[in-house]
Image (cartoon, helix red, strand yellow):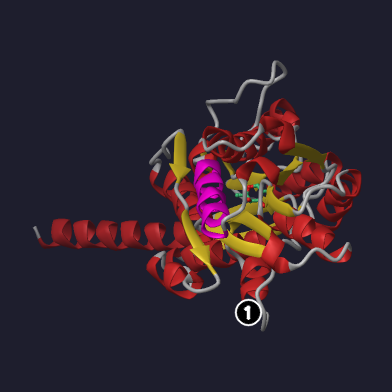
Amino acid sequence: MKLWKQAILAGAALLVAVGAASAQDVKIGFVVKQPEEPWFQDEWKFAQEAAKEKGFTLVEIGAEDGEKVQAAIDNLGAQGAQGFIICTPDVKLGPGIVAKAMANDLKLMTVDDRLVDNAGNPIEDVPHMGISATKIGETVGQAIVDEVKKRGWDMASVGAIKVSYDQLPTAVDRVAGATSVLEANGFPAANIFNAPQAKTDTEVALNAATTVINAHPEIQHWVAVGLNDEAVLGAVRATESVGISAANVVGVGIGGAESAINEFKKPSETGFFGTVIISPKRHGYETALNMYEWIANDAEPEKLILTSGQLATRGDYEQVRKDLGIE
Ligand code: FCA
């Protein structure tokens, strides 16, 4: 009887030990397309919080192109990781990423940008967390409409710079959401000018927007939309570079990370009127936690989670960030 008891106790201790060891053995990659962008740094920061809390290792990798993505996945496999989360530089790499993950026996989740297959349809098997792109775009559009009305501008004479990045579906949905609200509120479709960007950073957006502004010297009042804060900041910088004052510009971005905060902190108001703050905590912490649960406890993550956003301006962004738990 005594022996039995001892055996059971020893077995229980062993189980506990195995459990603890496996948390330490869990290694998860977090691969992002633009490591220099504050949004992605925030995602990493919150993902590391999950790692600390659960005791696993989180490997941060920046992968700006397809080759780097391939190398990152092989590298994670060689390091003995069990899974990774990725925001890919190009959603069309989808089938290749899925194949590489399988070859390396790695679980795969995506964040922000959803992989597409060869026909351009989302790869629904891969668990994904993205933003509610259309709805967030609509919030941008409404914020602009409200501010244009407040400033008493004649809607028919306002120009809109639409900084677009059409190879990324979430970007298309975001700007389409914004322009749909502009048009529904009497904004002439003919005054919405496309400023396509080949890369999603401020400098490229600035160049694209400058072309639009130079082509329309008749326009006195400008509004600007784009897929993220960097895109809208590019448009705002473009208006500044040709001497259009902040009072004549209403740009509303999406993100709410350091790029937007720095703008709000400037001593005087700029044309960057607001941003729809999205949650790097959910996209970083929660995806990492879900991946951990999948690896350690076989709990499969939901296939699709779409997160929401909240409008913030110079006056209230600190409070909004606090409310969202992303200080
Ligand atoms: C895309 C954009 C990022 C961020 C993210 C949620 O990846 O490029 O700036 O908005 O979606």
Q: Which residue is mark 1?
A: 265
Figure check: 110 above or below 256: above
Figure check: 198 above or below 120: below
Q: Which stretch is magenta?
A: 137-151
Instruction: Give SS at disc 1.
Output: helix
Task: Please tell me which residue lies in front, 326 or 47.
Answer: 326
Query: Does the image show residue 38?
Result: no
Query: Does the image show residue 45?
Result: yes
Q: For the stretch drawn in magenta, what is the main secondary structure?
A: helix
> As drawn, which residue projects farthest toward the top?
119
Task: Please tell me which residue lies in front, 175 or 305.
Answer: 175
Residue type, mark 1 in image: Lys
For the N terminus, the quadrant is bottom left
Residue in the image at 88% along x and 62% along y: 242
* Corner quadrant of residue 235: bottom right
Q: Is residue 144 magenta?
A: yes
Residue 265, how many percent across, how many down? 63, 79
Figure check: 326 above or below 173: below
Residue 7, how many percent across, how many down? 22, 58
